[in-house]
Image: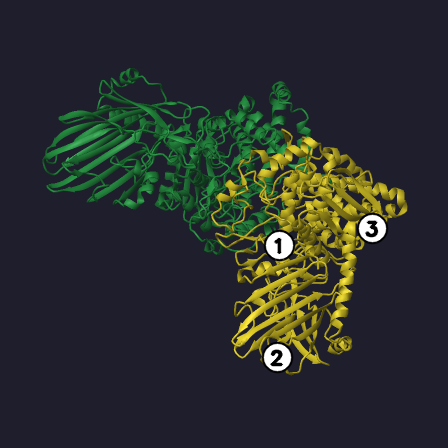
Chain colours: A green, B yellow
Amino acid sequence: MNSDWLFTQTGYDPEDLNGLGNRFMLANGYMGYRGVLEEYGKKQLVALNLGGVYDRNGDKWRETVNAPDPMAITLTRGDQAFSVLKQSPLAHTMTLDCQHAKVSRHTVFQAPEGTVTITSERFLSAAATHYGALQYHIEADFAGDFTLRAGIDHDVWDINGPHLFNYAQTVQDDTFCVFARTGEKCVPIAVWQKQFLDAPAEASIERATTGLFRNYQLHLTANVPVTLTVFFGVSETERDDNAIALAMRGVQASDFATWQAAHEAVWAKWWAQSDIEIDGPVDDQRALRYSLYQLLAIAPHGVADQSIPARGLSGQTYKGAIFWDTEMFMLPFFLATDAETARSLVGYRIRGLQAAKQKAASYGFQGAFYAWESQENGFDATSDFNVTDVFTKRPMRTYFRDKQVHISGAIALSIWQTAQWLNDPKLLLSGGAEVILECARFYLDYVKQGLLDDTIVCDDVIGPDEYHERVNNNAYTNKIIEETWRAALAVIDWLQKQAPSALKTMLGQLHYADLPQLIAASLPKLKQPLVKDGVIAQFDGYFGLEDTTVEAVRSRLLDPREYWGGAYGVASQTQVIKQADVMMMLALFPQDYSPETHQQNYAYYEPRTEHGSSLSWSMYAIEAARLGLGDAAHDFFVKTATVDLTGQSKQWAGSIYIGGTHPAANGGAWLVAMRGFAGMQVRDGQLEFKNQLPPQWRAMRFHVGYHGRHYSVTLKAGQEQPEVEEN
Amino acid sequence: MNSDWLFTQTGYDPEDLNGLGNRFMLANGYMGYRGVLEEYGKKQLVALNLGGVYDRNGDKWRETVNAPDPMAITLTRGDQAFSVLKQSPLAHTMTLDCQHAKVSRHTVFQAPEGTVTITSERFLSAAATHYGALQYHIEADFAGDFTLRAGIDHDVWDINGPHLFNYAQTVQDDTFCVFARTGEKCVPIAVWQKQFLDAPAEASIERATTGLFRNYQLHLTANVPVTLTVFFGVSETERDDNAIALAMRGVQASDFATWQAAHEAVWAKWWAQSDIEIDGPVDDQRALRYSLYQLLAIAPHGVADQSIPARGLSGQTYKGAIFWDTEMFMLPFFLATDAETARSLVGYRIRGLQAAKQKAASYGFQGAFYAWESQENGFDATSDFNVTDVFTKRPMRTYFRDKQVHISGAIALSIWQTAQWLNDPKLLLSGGAEVILECARFYLDYVKQGLLDDTIVCDDVIGPDEYHERVNNNAYTNKIIEETWRAALAVIDWLQKQAPSALKTMLGQLHYADLPQLIAASLPKLKQPLVKDGVIAQFDGYFGLEDTTVEAVRSRLLDPREYWGGAYGVASQTQVIKQADVMMMLALFPQDYSPETHQQNYAYYEPRTEHGSSLSWSMYAIEAARLGLGDAAHDFFVKTATVDLTGQSKQWAGSIYIGGTHPAANGGAWLVAMRGFAGMQVRDGQLEFKNQLPPQWRAMRFHVGYHGRHYSVTLKAGQEQPEVEEN
């Protein structure tokens, strides 16, 4: 196996429990399984996370559901448990194989008579996404009696649970089934499992309150391995153990290889579309592949109108909700490598239009105001109190839900970009245009005009930099409004040519007839940001704030966990910002600003940016690459590509787990490689590349799709012209 | 002497130091002197406060200046100091005589050989406002040697000082002079003093770093009193001890009585205009008189274009600044009793128009945005960080300065009210109209209009209830905007009839020609508040906040000193409010709302009001009186009239002194008596009264001026028709 694809961690560090959970995560679009060990339980944050299933317990935050764990296995001998939780192993290795989306372990334990070695490997099937399989090998260098316990553990870890109730355990034709229902909407959850042990053993069934297990009394011969093979399934189906047993009837132990081959074939296809090969530091190659692995693992392949939560399928953090992260940081990857998944992501938002219109209406606005934390059907799960004050332990009124209006533009523009990238007007006619027009309408209603001055202002918003709340005329937000309005006019223009009668019907149904003219009249009046010495003010009054450094602000913290933003945070009254804001605008719309503007704003904002969000580094990396700052671009690339490998991101906020994977940073790594290092841009409907490789990279090769055509692209250091070949 | 006029406190409570300072305050419009004892020093918060002189030390808050203390006297015998700070007195009494604006003390100390009695009385001359006088009597019931030390103590107490520098001490012709300059603007401050002792003593001059004193070695005969008489002066004049000595040359000890008579004659005149006599509880009579005493003492009688700070002349609290308190709670008293002082108050705001225009411009607005904390020439002293977080000790960003836009309307409407009350169009032509028009223009620029809906909104403000920051469409503020616009149109209309050519010139000079039409067109579009079951929503979304009780909110305090408002205060996300807001609107514009509206809103808002401001009780009292809720009205009357007598208001915020007198509550007591109990209203240019006496009052008699005429009014319980007689 090629080490460019492998992530191996040697030794067991009990303190690194959360890091392992994220780093060795498996997922297949339907479910995610944290990088845990078979002997782990809820305290070690085991989670079989179901991305599309949400539940609310009482007044707590609504979040995705974790299913019962069908890979729970323990091995004991008398009083001794062969568990890293009970004894420090002699040796321990965990490995993620990104190429084949498999996780394996190898652990050696000391027993009084000798050593016991446990090895396992598992995968969540990419070929049949409700299924997964595990092999668990035991070998001792002495002969002896052991107890092996394997089954479905439904003592589930939750952040805001419990979510599953009314458990039932059944055993039919050797198939274990556990059924339960969610508390809020009674969604049925079924988890089933079939076990094969390749050695004689006395087996008994244990129906515990915490799960359904089989206990094997097993005699091991010295140096003869024994293997337990587990096949499992998870779905939201009504209780029917007969049907499940029937479906599992033909499964044999030997099917592990068959299942695995089918799984790997799917991954091979994905990698063929998506891989980026580089000649350069192997760590860069691995980190980039790790990033793409994460995106491929969590994407809703083959499922219509689904999207990707901000923490992927790594757990319930951020309520398992979908943020603008998906459109801004992940969608471009799928547009270029997997059009159907891109369509699914966009379809999720089209499907969510009704909820977005309801949200707008609930605030008294027309049009569509998309959810900040979007759950099923576009429901906004954001609390008005999304942060807790570390000093008073009181919930703090936050404005993520009601003032981050740039989310609507992110959706509208992503749909517009998708229609253009895929050259697909059907997307517009099947709901896409309506979303764009309703987002444009929302902005028409949100902005205001003076009586003495016809400048149109957009007051009381939060831009990408969340540390500055309720600001007026955030440059990024106003630009997004402007581009959304332009997109609305362009959509109308396009449809006028492509489908004039459908357009007419649509404008009539939406009562939109007068709005195109209003949009056109409003565009030139929208407030433009103040520019001082070439630097674009992030919002009205920004330059009047204290001009200090990130380190100075950090030094004012009284508690390392306190929130930097809000009304009184250490950053709130300074020019120090959480993440790319003006720079995000420049990174997204590079052609609209002069090279000097890019340079001056990079120089101004970079030292003032905390990069307190995983959305920040990639934007600075792209801009650095464009500005020829190769080393800086490379540094930021490494940060965005390794965020889940180093595990240095924040894992806990007080007693609340906020860790998990960072797919926006993963997507950001792809964006840096493509828009930064490969200089990818669409200009006048043409896909262009430009050699902006960092000094550390000698070459870069990848495939990309655009307008339904597929290209192979190679860039080489010192060779200005990229080699582009249509496949 | 009539006990209805006297406030006597018996016994000495060292803990009540602040209360005494306020309760026994003397003032004469030019200066205030806290109710301190002669042996007090800066630690006991001695302050000779100069209301019109401001200074800023470094980056601290700008505040009024406290002058050196010319009434510092100590008496000792050997090691024994006859001071309440050194020994607990055998007897102690302090008395304020409101009728004559004098404070006296009587203290008996134990000495080894017998007792020593100190008596003093002092006044700040109402006849010559730069002067004051003091008599200090000593009597022992045994013979012995004493040291008497008297002089000018310039070790001055300040909240944000020091403010005085470069001290010089001179003695010329027995007159002591101390000169100094303020640090910021080099304002010269002179304090001088002449002493007369009516017994032989060996005297020596002591030039200390903390002051200029004379030490008398004095032999007292048993039971023979000795009197020290002190005359003093204070002014902002350049150093000239010759001139001062010359001015003091003719002053003799016997002049104490002459000065006092002149002083009392002025007060007699004031009382003749202002007193309200009641048949009812003597405590009510005394509290009402105490309230009027405070107003009379701090008013700028005979001085043009001056105003009254929110803490009167009791010290530097709230920066010695002038708030809307003056216009809303004090001006009506002077309009009805002392037209020249009313004109002075209004003149201060006319003089401050330039500063208000500059403030508006600094926020990017046209028109006049008056200062929240107004100092000389209308300068806004409000800090953007006006509150300190008790948990983090960090300054909190507050919005009193930039979002309490209703202040401009308070000024505009007070000028309009003054012009109407006094029937004085000259006031409008000499600057008043310009203020009204510029405030109306400020609102035209502050409000905004939607693109899809022509409703005019006023977003991002703070209403009277400061616990809810940055709200949209505060009902009170929108009403004030509406009335300000109406006043602007009415002013134009009035001037069109009275002085058409002056009006034309003015509108031209102000570039105002198109605005009357815009105002007229905007009036019907201004957003009206939501009304639910008759209750007017305080602002957009108010009814969506947690509906709980004042006590429940109070019980959530983690620290008794924490701020209830701001972004995360215990009240911020609830319907609990600091003070009358919707109710203030109803109290000010009673005729614009139905009796049911008054009743329903009183019933709704009263239980939700903390009355955390001294501006609150009076508004509720007036409304209660109008609604026939006599007992409730009386309760609120007692609260507003006794706030400085009970001393139960907040005196300290952390380590910052925020105590002082509450002239708005004093003015509020007058408003309750007049608008509440006497039902005073102007309707169609007629002054009307209505018997709304509380059950505790049998009758009420007062004088009132309106349209230049003077009336005596008597109301009697059970007699519906008030007796009104023109004088």
Q: Write down the quadrant of residue B381 in the picture.
A: bottom right
Identify residue for label 2: B220
Q: CA distance from mark 2 to mark 1?
A: 37 Å
Q: Which residue is located at x 42 percent, y 26 percent?
A: A184
Q: Considering depth in this image, is B354 or A700 the residue closer to the camera?
A: B354
Q: CA distance from mark 3 to mark 1?
A: 37 Å
Q: Which residue is located at x 80 percent, y 52 percent?
A: B339
Badge number at residue B427: 3
The three-letter amino acid code for the residue at tag 3 is Leu
**Chain ID of residue with mark 2:** B
Image location of residue B376, percent across then percent down: 71, 59
Please, what secondary structure does the residue beneath circle 1 have?
A: helix
Mark 2, residues whose alpha carbon is within 10 Å: few (<14), some, or many (≥20)?
A: many
Identify residue for label 1: B645
Q: Are marks 3 and 1 on the same chain?
A: yes
The three-letter amino acid code for the residue at tag 2 is Leu
